[in-house]
Image (spheres, grey):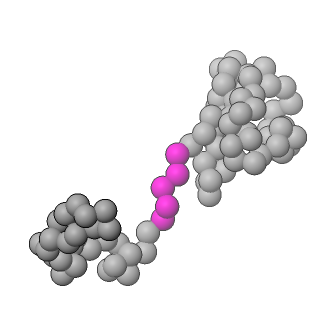
Amino acid sequence: MKLIQTVDGTMSVMQKSDKETPNRKNLNISFKEKSIPTILIANGEIIQENLSKHALRKQWLLDQLMRENIHNLSEVSYVEYEKGKGLFIQKFSQ
């Protein structure tokens, strides 16, 4: 450890670089950014705010549902979107 004086005159303790814990980037180990799924439809209702967060459009979502032979939102219980993985669609049980 080494003691350094900051610009405002206070003292700070800094760990020596050879003692720092390496991370995946330091070790050149490949990794994927983690993403969290976002709910786009719940109980047949589109959550517009979540579409907007991912710069997705309502028409794109409806087109994706049509590809899965879903023609009405009332058929859909739950839809989530995860970057890089696409959509997970759960229909209401019939």
What stretch of residues is rendered in magenta? 32-36
Q: Residue at x 73, y 22 (%)?
A: 44
Is residue 34 located in the magenta-colored stretch of the structure?
yes
User: Is the N terminus in the top left, top right, bottom left or bottom right quadrant?
Assistant: bottom left
Near-viewer residue (13 or 26):
13
In this rendering, position of residue 35 left or right of residue 61: left
**Is 23 located above or below residue 18 in the figure?**
above
Task: Please report the residue visible at 60 percent of the width from the left and 39 percent of the height from the top.
Answer: 38
Give the x, y percent position of residue 35.
52, 51
Task: Left or right? Give the position of 26 relative to 74.
Answer: left
Question: Total label count?
Answer: 0
Residue 89, visible in the rendered structure? no
In the depicted view, which residue is nearer to us: 25 or 30? 25
The outermost residue toward the left is 1
Q: Position of residue 53 (x, y in %)?
A: 68, 43
Q: Is residue 33 visible?
A: yes
Helix, strand or loop: magenta stretch: loop
Residue name at image x 48 percent, y 55 percent: 34
Give the residue at the far front of this rendering: 9
Q: Quadrant of the C terminus?
A: top right
Q: x and y percent of residue 78 in the render?
A: 65, 29
Whether 21 is among the magenta residues is no
Q: Nearer the viewer, residue 84 or 48?
A: 48
Q: Quadrant of residue 26?
A: bottom left
The residue at 87%/40% (across/down) is 59
- Viewer-side residue, 61 vs 56: 56
Q: How far across and how far down the image is residue 61, in percent?
A: 80, 40
